Amino acid sequence: MTDRPRLLLLDGHSLAYRAYYALPVENFTTTSGQSTNVVYGFANMLANALRDERPTHAAVAFDVSRSTFRTEAFPEYKATRSRSPEGFGGQLRILDELLAAMSVPVLRAPGYEADDVIASLTARAGAEGLDVLIITGDRDVLQLVGDDVTVLYFYRTASEMIRYTPETVREKYGLSPAQYPDFAALRGDPSDNLPGIPGIGEKTAAKWVREFGSLDALLDRAGEVKGKAGERLRAALDTVRLNRRLTELVRDLDLPVEIGDLRRRPYDVAAFTSLLDELEFRNPSLRQRLFAADPGGGRPPETTPAAAERERIEGRELDAGELAGWLRTRATGLTGLAAEYTWARGEGGVTRIALATGDGHAASFEPPALTAADERAFADWLADPARPKALHDVKSLLRVFGEHGIGEHGPIAGIAADTAMAAYLLLPGLAAYGIADLAGRHLGRRPPEGGPAGLMLSARAVLDLAGVFAADLASTGMDTVLREVELPLSDLLARAERAGVHVDAGLLEELEGRFAAAMERAADEAAEIAGRRFNPGSTKQLQEVLFGELGLPKTKKIKSGYSTDLDALTWLAAQTDNGLPQVLLRHRDQARLRTTVTGLIREIGADGRIHTTFRQTVAATGRLTSTDPNLQVIPIRTGEGRSIRRAFRPGPGYESLMTADYGQLELRVMAHLSQDPTLLAAFESGEDLHTTMAAQVFRVSQDAVTPEMRRKIKAMSYGLAYGLSAFGLAKQLGIPVAEARPLMDAYFERLGGVRDYLDHVVAEARVTGYTRTVLGRRRHLPQLASDDRRRRETAERMALNAPVQGSAADIVKIAMLRVDGALTAAGLRSRLLLQVHDEIVLEVAPGERDAVEEIVRTGMTTAYPLSVGLEVAVGTGPDWDAAAH
């Protein structure tokens, strides 16, 4: 290729099918049930092509339907192709949205195929002096290859391509590109259901074209071909002529665009960002590559004067000694702040900070280069409640600033906005809440990443986003949730992250060795049963042993054969007397425990403590999550799992750990919200809830309730908070769906208030588009109005569980704030370290145990006035497991 303008043409259907079969649909589904493997794979291929090929023009061609001039001439054309797989067609509509947001024209021509559109555009582009690059999985397009036309052909997977030039075509087939359709007509094409000549393969077909120069010449002189091959050719002349007519691409379609219309244009940044969020494309690499390909640099092609004025900044890189004066004269009103920083087990730091004001001024500076006077001025500004600040991801800023001595003379005060948290409250469940993502979604622009100028534009974006979100927060009432719950919690969580939790590294290393040895023993036992050694962690080898060599019952069919996941092995263990599935389950359990311990060891900091990161903007229900490492998944149900918790211990200067856990919080929330008299009475009786409920449902006395009855009702009761279906209950209990459905009917017959409440929640959400928690936190569910039954039913399950789970999360957060506030007010050194679902973990200082327990009980039981009250169990011990209650 030369430096001339370059047109990139993509065969949309071809790439979409490649994406569908390359990416398992079960791994690419949104929380609403929308399949996204086609869109994700297509976007990934497009991003790479735009990055690697740097086209000046681009377009995507799609087929319209199976009815074309070719099917009119030959009704069996492509007749053997199966119908589009489930979930494929709906994604093509999303692809249209994606390409529209990227300003990439999409072309379709009724009665013709995408190849014909590509051929016609190629002819026009060549006439206008453009190079052309075609990406496809259809070999018919090879006839278009020329000195200025290159074809990238997917030949096995969505990532393996051959670059066809005229030389490559000759090397592959011994023919010129112009001769390729002659060759294809002789060879036939099973994928298009075009018959070949019986007994004539590709080598013979290519040899004939080379010898005679063209198909026309061959057919005119067919009598010269000797032997059986000649007889077969002469018997198939009509077939070959038809094939040749069908394989020839149309190059003169009357398309509604000119080549100039295909010049790459800036994205519709707001629409593009919104779509990526709705599709839950969280992969930062993909998002970065897609945005990096935007010819507009993430900015709209045209802006109104008012928008242009907002984007214009007068930025300065401040030298040492200039910050104090800038803060005094410029940062008097609401000021946006953005920072570049890193942290990893105590390493890293803040590399640059930028500030932006509403009058268009901005500044950036490097904290390590500040003078002592500048440091004091910045700390005073941060701590001054009269100097309002718009920040992004307050918790992370509080943590990193605290770790690296920025603002150490006082906390950050005067926080008027946290744009990440505001966006989360308004639209929970988005794929990304970064400054650039939100600016693209809500401002129609993306600040460039990196460098002082980019950071100053980010600070300005934070300021503008604060204004956008303020009115929406106030109108929905969630400004109160932000101000009274999430912002104070950010401070608490930042302190907990900085404190970390002390661990016994030696015990963790001992456990790692123990679990590794148990894995090896399980592998030996598996080899003895199977009669040979194999890798229990290899799906392929498991399939060979279980289903091939041992002939065990087949599990769920997957792309690579039959499933060997946890559910499949559990099912196999119940279906057969062969002991191998049970041994494999034990191996898998030990491997999981070892992985958990290995991850914990890796995260131990120089201070001997693990510093997890709590995430406030991940779970759409409002629950906190934990990452790097995830301390919310430390096992508790088995002795081996609890042994990991024994490694979590009080650090120097502290004498014990304390755990406090709500009892049946979600069920209490359900009783409060539904006001079901049976459920309320069950709580008020003080008896075992699940036994009481089982007696009601099965119509027996409480003394007659069996453990199996209680187990079924417990699963049912907790499942209500998760929108449990009859299918889900059957799977959970290991019973047929036909048995689970009557059980649910009997349950709801006795708990009519719960049934009516759940029906009301879904009906109300259909009208309003969202659910609400006890604090007014919203969960938006537009998919309730979807025409897609699967997406609609998924949204209904979300509507069922969001108010209960979200309200429980709200209550835990309020409890944490009350406990933390009371500890501070009492002047105690004891501190809150962890939150795990409905449990909090504290590090208790010497002599403070009784006072801390009283504070914890009071703070947690009074967090919210539920109709049935809140119960808390508290325990204290030398480690996390011993502190259990």
Image (spheres, rainbow, N blue to C red):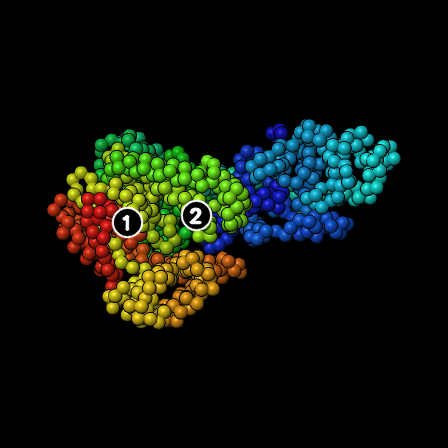
**For this rendering, which residue is in front, 112 or 311?**
112
Q: Position of residue 347 (x, y in %)?
A: 30, 33
Which residue occupies 44% across, 38% down?
Answer: 527
Eye-nearest disc, 1 or 2 = 2
Give the x, y percent position of residue 881: 24, 46
Query: Is residue 823 at all visible to an observer of this figure?
Result: yes
> Residue drawn 75% across and 44% down?
195
Q: Is residue 68 above or below residue 355?
A: below
Q: Secondary structure at mark 2?
A: helix
Q: Which residue is mark 1?
A: 835
**Looking at the image, is 100 positioned above or below residue 478?**
above
Q: Residue furthest left?
A: 847
Q: Quadrant of residue 648?
A: top left
Give me the residue at 31% from left, 30% from top: 319
Q: Residue at x 22, y 47 (%)?
A: 882
**Relative vertical location of residue 174 with respect to residue 631 in this rendering, above or below:** above
Quadrant in the rendering for residue 122: top right
The disc labelled 2 sits on which kind of residue?
Leu
- Left-right relation of 213 to 286: right
The answer to whether residue 274 is left or right of residue 118 is left
Neighbourhood count class around disc 1 (C-alpha, 10 Å): few under 14, some 14–19, many 20 upward: many
Check disc 2 and report the residue beneath it.
566
Task: Residue 587: give its label.
Answer: none
Q: Nearer the viewer, residue 51 or 774?
A: 774
User: How many angstroms separate mark 1 from mark 2 (CA)?
Assistant: 28 Å
